[in-house]
Amino acid sequence: MIGDISLVTICWNAEGTLQRTLEGVLAQEVLPREYRVVDGGSTDGTLALLERWQGRFRERGVDFQVERQVRLPGEAGIPGAWNQALAQVRCGIVALLNADDWYDPPVLRLVEEAFRRSPALGALSLPVWMHPASPGREWLFRPASLGQLPWRMPVPHPGTFFRRTTYERVGRYDTAYRIAADYDFIWRCHLAKIPWGTLDQACIHMQLGGLANASRALARRETYRIARRHGSPWDPRPALAWLLRALSAR
């Protein structure tokens, strides 16, 4: 079964994890109508892997497209790649799945059913299993109230899905941010009063250890700037959150 879903994956030298991502997508009970992959200039076997999988998706009726990222001066790579794909998506629901994350089979069916039940819904978040480098230390990131935005990211971005009309209303990702563009986007959705829903099923997985974990100081600076930009100038929580993260090296 094919759903009204555009799936976006961005990648760069992801040969070691991308196959797991692709396997999870092809095993979905409801497949995306289109799957857009933006590659940031891989020099390993990523592009060869994508070429091998392209036919398998197309045999199942998925419009599978791979393109090289067009890098613009001054733009951060991750949000720039997201935006490149988002400029071309055509379906009513948009999913972002990075090349080291993966879905269990019911994810896209649950998401499409939830949006169909609630036509006014502009965004939907599901819990995400977070997988550190050490096996056996997984933990579950459950969506929380967007009222927590001044001091933390309350929803897991890999587990959050948007209507295409939400991007048309709020705009795409701010390419000034290398790490926290998703946090900025969630803030803008909150300020625009996008109707938000949640589901309880935990069937999405995120592999920790990416850019945000490798550049914690930059992540702290960006999240602080974003919270100060969008929140009240008298709210002490962004500064307190920055201090606590710095003291704990998070």
Image: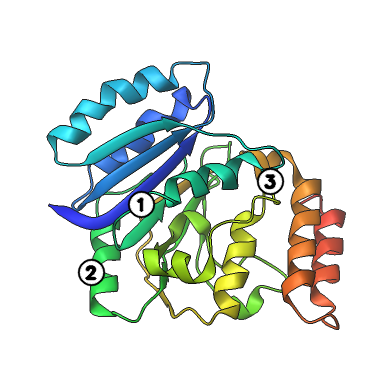
Q: Is residue 66 above or below residue 52?
A: below
Q: Residue at x 14, y 41 (%)?
A: 61
Contact, mark 3 vs mark 1 (Cβ under 8 Å): no
| N-term mark: 3 or 1 | 1
Q: Residue at x 22, y 42 (%)?
A: 27
* Residue at image mark 1: 89
Measured Cα–Cα span from mark 3 to mark 1? 23 Å
The image quarter in which residue 80 lies: top right
Q: Residue at x 82, y 62 (%)?
A: 242
Number of callouts: 3
* Residue at image mark 3: 178
Measured Cα–Cα span from mark 1 to mark 2? 20 Å
Q: Name the front one of labels 1 and 2.
A: 1
| N-term mark: 1 or 2 | 1
* Residue at image mark 2: 113
Contact, mark 2 vs mark 3 (Cβ under 8 Å): no
Contact, mark 1 vs mark 2 (Cβ under 8 Å): no
Q: Nearer the viewer, residue 216 or 54?
A: 54
The answer to whether one can see residue 52 in this image is yes
Classed neighbour count for the residue bearing mark 3: other residues with Cα under 10 Å, few (<14), some (14–19), many (≥20)? many
Classed neighbour count for the residue bearing mark 2: other residues with Cα under 10 Å, few (<14), some (14–19), many (≥20)? few
Q: Is residue 87 above or below residue 156?
A: above
Classed neighbour count for the residue bearing mark 1: other residues with Cα under 10 Å, few (<14), some (14–19), many (≥20)? some
Picture coordinates of residue 240 (x, y %)?
85, 70
In the image, is 181 to the left or to the right of 245? left
Q: Nearer the viewer, residue 36 or 157?
A: 36
* Amino acid at the residue labelled 3: Arg
Picture coordinates of residue 4 (x, y %)?
23, 59
In the image, is 32 to the left or to the right of 13? left
| Element type at mark 3 | loop
* Amino acid at the residue labelled 1: Val
Q: Residue at x 78, y 47 (%)?
A: 218
